[in-house]
Image (cartoon, grey):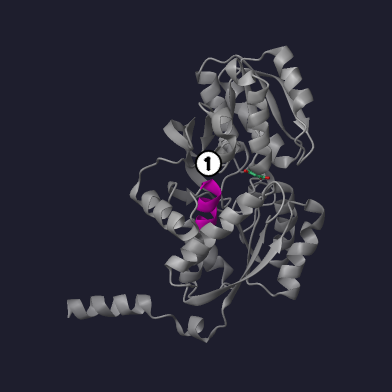
Amino acid sequence: MKGLKFSLVALAMVIPSAFAQSQPPLKVGMMLPYSGTFAALGNAIDNGFQLYVKEQGGKIGGREITYVRVDDESEPSKATDNINKLIKRDNVDVVIGTVHSGVAMAMAKVAKETGTTLIIPNAGADIITGPMCAKNIFRSSFSNSQPGFAMGEVAAKKGYKNAMTITWKYAAGEESVKGFKEGFEKGGGKVTKELTLPFPGVEFQALLTEVAAAKPDVVYSFFAGGGAVKFVKDYAAAGLNKSIPLVGPGFLTDGTLEAQGESAQGMLTALHYGDNLNIKRDNEFRLAYAKQYRLQPDVYAVQGYDAAQMLAVGLKATKGDISKKDDFAKAIRATKFDSPRGSFTMSNANNPIQDFYLRQVVGKENKVIGIASKSLADPARGCTIQ
Ligand code: PHB
């Protein structure tokens, strides 16, 4: 009798609900940068997302998945039109995107107004899980201040007294620097100068000359993708890496080491992922990803994979019905996600509460050498959903 009960329960778990069976495929709108300085990031997110769906046999919550893709070009001025096209013209059921914080802020505004479910697989704009937070907006990545804060604490503990910062002048760069400053100054350090250039510029020479003249103890920098490759190479070409350590959020060296080569060796960064975690979940993920794409995964691939996991958790709880927004959100909030990065839970603002690792570049790997910040939550200042 007991056996029969168990097998009925098991059967119920594999038989899709009547709702899911009667539904057309779930339309997923992928709004990502497939061109420009963040193109590799967008592609890795897309790959990670697809890998998870493939591992579930192409269906989540009992529903087949189809994709509609738009290249957002990391261009905030086109963002509102792009997401509106996905929602109103293509009638997508859910939007996954994006990388760039400025684009994501415009997307979050539209998602909030239309009630469309939005899962952000990278962009860390603090405001999205702060004053703009909403029940239908989730993030599978981080908030910008998190890795900055973690690296700031480490830099202070290493005894650096003064720091200069260099970044692109837009939300992600500014918030990353703000997080670093908070962690560094709490530990007794002082940020003496904040240098910026417009996104996605790569004319770094004048800024590097300023660094060379000021000789700070350490430089903290936020760049990613193509911009990170160029910055780290220019920093080393100017000979600065010999005398002034360059640190950053892990984006500075994630998915970029092949191209940065010698110039990145020894660098310390903080991030919620690394290349040698050596946990079963990650080992399996890395193997599957490499097999599928003939590429090594990076943090962006993990965030894409976990965005799909998040969608799956919500859809499973609602038996494939994404319009049941309360149940969808409740299930995500109640889940401990088994991620390649290690497990994480979601905060009340729908942002991961996760460990930030301290990593060091050795060869072509970001080797985890410790924990920079344990179970770090997004401060979620101004978020009123509970
Ligand atoms: C962002 O714009 O929020 C952003 C972009 C690239 C990263 C991290 C954050 O690697």
Q: Nearer the viewer, residue 168 or 128?
A: 168
Looking at the image, how many numbered discs can be counted on the residues?
1
Q: Main secondary structure of the magenta part?
A: helix
Q: Secondary structure at mark 1?
A: loop
Q: Position of residue 112 (x, y in %)?
A: 70, 61
Q: Nearer the viewer, residue 185 or 67?
A: 67
Q: Position of residue 93 (x, y in %)?
A: 63, 72
Q: Residue at x 61, y 29 (%)?
A: 180
Indicate the quadrant containing the N terminus: top left, top right, bottom left or bottom right. bottom left
Confirm whether the magenta stretch covers residue 267: no
Q: Position of residue 79 (x, y in %)?
A: 77, 57
Residue 77 can be seen in this image: yes
Left or right: 220, with 23 as reference point: right
Q: Position of residue 45 (x, y in %)?
A: 57, 55
Q: Which residue is mark 1?
A: 377
Left or right: 299, with 219 as reference point: left
Boundaries of the magenta span? 298-306
Q: Nearer the viewer, residue 320 or 162?
A: 162
Left or right: 31, with 319 as reference point: right
Asked whether mark 1 lies closer than 8 Å to ligand 1, one says no
Q: Residue at x 75, y 29 (%)?
A: 204
Q: Residue at x 69, y 46 (%)?
A: 127
Amino acid beneath label 1? Ala
Q: Quadrant of ligand 1?
A: top right
In the image, is residue 17 above or below residue 177?
Answer: below
In the image, is residue 67 above or below residue 332?
Answer: below
In this view, the residue farthest toward the right is 77
